[in-house]
Amino acid sequence: MVKFTKKAFRAFQTLQQIHIRMKKSVSVHCSSLLLFFWILSAGSTKHGQPETYAMRQLLTTKGLVALWDFKEEEGQPRNANGAANFPLKEQNGTLPRVSEGPLSGYSTLFGNKAFLSLPNAELGKLNIYGKKQGVTVMAWVKWTGEQTGFVGGIWNEYLDGGKRQYGLFVSLPYYNGRNQVCGHISQTGKPTPPFPYSIDYSASAQTVPINEWCCVAFTYDGTHIRSYFNGIFEARDPELIEHTKGFAGYPEGLTHSKNPYFFPDGIGTNGSDFTVGAVLLKAGMGNFFKGQIGGLAVFDRTLSETELKKLSKSFPKK
């Protein structure tokens, strides 16, 4: 057995205390580092999925009224961030959630003739209207390319002769908008005289790709409607608008630019619901969007091209 002198024993006790303190210090530092990295990780995710640059920027952009990221499961209302939660409820069936999307990492799959709706009485600040009132609607979509698709807005083409207000479409071929981003504005809610339908919409020069994520948007500034694809505006020269020949005042048809589209009448407040994925037509709900919608934002002002480029530049390619 080894014997220690008192001096040696005291020295041994001191070394033990130093060792214990060092172990505690290392443990505390390691725990602090683990907590730090956990906080960083938690701050960069949303509902288990990466939060994109676009999502962070959208939430802090001036004029945001509503932003839906479609993270909710099938059967649940889709709630918004913004001025209120604006719960969009499923109609005519349920809509599956897909674990893919540019904002929350999720999206809603449309294609079974179900759609989302918010009653007119609950619109609140979504009821955007006025002679010089601006509006911007933008969405992240993965479109199948099969048919005209209504993305979102306040649009009703039949009840009481029409309760159109503002709406974002993909592909409105009748008046030169086939496979393009189309932004519709109405003041009266009715068709455009003397034509049978509302002709007042912009249509992008670019076409919307099939089965590929992209950002589609339109703005209105009280004078012009402009369509944007992935944040880019491309002008179209004046052109003969199809299906306009032979109407009163237009024997040779109407020649007009589709982007921008001149419309100085302003936005009416016409009493329709806010819907996503379909609108009411004479034959019932129609213009069903087919594909995925992973984000929808509405602003009560006209966003600039610079802002739209910044907000739409971060999304999956496929």
Image (cartoon, grey):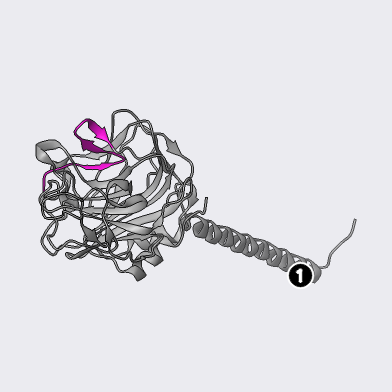
Near mark 1 (Cα within 10 A), the count class, few <14, some 14-19 or many ≥20, is: few
Between 152 and 76, the residue placed more toward the observer is 152
Q: Quadrant of the N terminus?
A: bottom right
Q: How many marks?
A: 1
In the rendered structure, which amino acid carries the disc numbered 1?
Ala
Q: Is residue 30 above or below residue 142?
A: below
7 lies left or right of 280: right
Q: Is residue 27 above or below residue 285?
A: below
Q: Quadrant of residue 158?
A: top left
Residue in the picture at 16% in, 43% down: 196
Q: Which residue is mark 1?
A: 11
Q: State which region is magenta.
A: 270-286
Between 210 and 165, the residue placed more toward the observer is 210
Residue lying at the far right of the rendered structure: 1
Between 281 and 294, the residue placed more toward the observer is 281
Q: Position of residue 119 (x, y in %)?
A: 18, 39
Q: Is residue 312 visible?
A: yes
Residue in the picture at 84% in, 64% down: 4
The answer to whether residue 275 is magenta is yes
130 lies left or right of 153: left
Q: Position of residue 10 (x, y in %)?
A: 75, 68
Between 186 and 103, the residue placed more toward the observer is 186
The answer to whether residue 179 is magenta is no
214 lies left or right of 121: right
Residue in the picture at 44% in, 41% down: 144
Q: Is residue 41 above or below residue 107?
A: below
Q: Position of residue 301 (x, y in %)?
A: 22, 63
Q: Quadrant of residue 33?
A: bottom right
Residue in the picture at 11% in, 44% down: 271
Q: Position of residue 145 (x, y in %)?
A: 42, 43
Q: Is residue 296 visible?
A: no
Dot 1 falls on a residue whose secondary structure is helix
